Amino acid sequence: MTGSLPGEVQSVFDRFITTELTTIDGRGHPITWPVTPYYRPAEPCIDVTTGLGYPKKANDARANPLVALLFSDPTGSGLNDPPMVLVQGSAEVDDHDLDANRERYQRESLEKLPGTAKLHPPAPLKRFLDWYYTRIYIHIRPERVYVWSRGDIAGEPDLYGAHMEEVRSGHFEEPARFHADPVGGASSWHPRITELGTRYPTAVLSIASPDGFPFSVRVPVRVDEAARWIRIEGAPTEIPFAPGLACLTAHSHGESFTWQQNFQVRGDLFFAEGSWTLVPHRVVGGFEAPASRLGLVRANARKARRYRRTAKRELAKRR
């Protein structure tokens, strides 16, 4: 359906250098991470990728192909006031030819992000980084697309795709799928949470919709340290929030993607004292990249050992 979308929406798919991918794990928990989208206008799918050493995104998408992509951070896209776009679609995991995927990734990533060329190691050293350069692709075929003009979530989004009347009415004719209720319990605090509302005035909130698709939107956030909660500021009433498991993801990156930072907070979403609120239960740091090759190595040295072990297990399974 991408070829029938407005040109400005296709430009978002093509020009954005990050998109927030949401999968739903086996417990029904939405998990959101920033990834790089690969798309050419009118192609049927938007592709994203993950390293063989950290395959959870692909494993979750294989087990539950209902996924979402949110295009909410235009940094580095060169677009002025682009819309915020949410894609709900079906995922197909592509790992049948890892050698071809590796070659494709090395070619396309430099085409998409030429500024990162100086961060890549010389070719002879890349074999020590198989856990990163050996890639799993995820092809996402859009089924439903929400478009907020100029990124204004206070306005009603334009909708494209299947089941539009159900979306507009808030009523889903499809059978309700599994929805994980809040787990309850006290909040679990972490120093990075205090970056929300300050360093990161907005973050991406993801939930599981009643029809089983993830739903993500970028919202203003505020930390309530006294209550040890995270307040969602100004959430529009049209968004199908409901008490349950949720994920709040904060990330930033440079214009040419020479550095990136990200983390997520997983917890319970509920309505309290006039606003939607997240009770944090776990903070998870992502793959972060300082703006130098040496800094990149230092920041991820400990994780790299774990990723390398995981990649070996993944290769053994495929053999």
Image (spheres, rainbow, N blue to C red):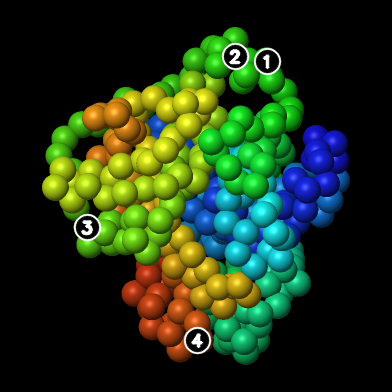
Q: Nearer the viewer, residue 219 or 38?
A: 219
- Distance from Cα at disc 3 to Cα at disc 2: 39 Å
Q: Nearer the viewer, mark 1 or mark 4?
A: 1
Q: Residue at x 34, y 61 (%)?
A: 198
**In the rendered image, which residue does mark 1 sit on?**
165
On the question of residue 234 being in view, the answer is: yes
Residue 219 x/y as whole percent: 45, 44
Mark drawn on residue 190: 3
For mark 2, give the secondary structure. Answer: helix
The three-letter code of the residue at mark 2 reads: Ser
**In the rendered image, which residue does mark 4 sit on?**
292
Cβ–Cβ under 8 Å for marks 1 and 4: no
- Distance from Cα at disc 3 to Cα at disc 1: 42 Å
Q: Is residue 185 left or right of residue 141?
A: left
Q: Nearer the viewer, residue 60 or 118?
A: 118
Mark 4 crowd level (few <14, some 14–19, many ≥20, 10 Å Cα) = some
- Distance from Cα at disc 2 to Cα at disc 4: 50 Å
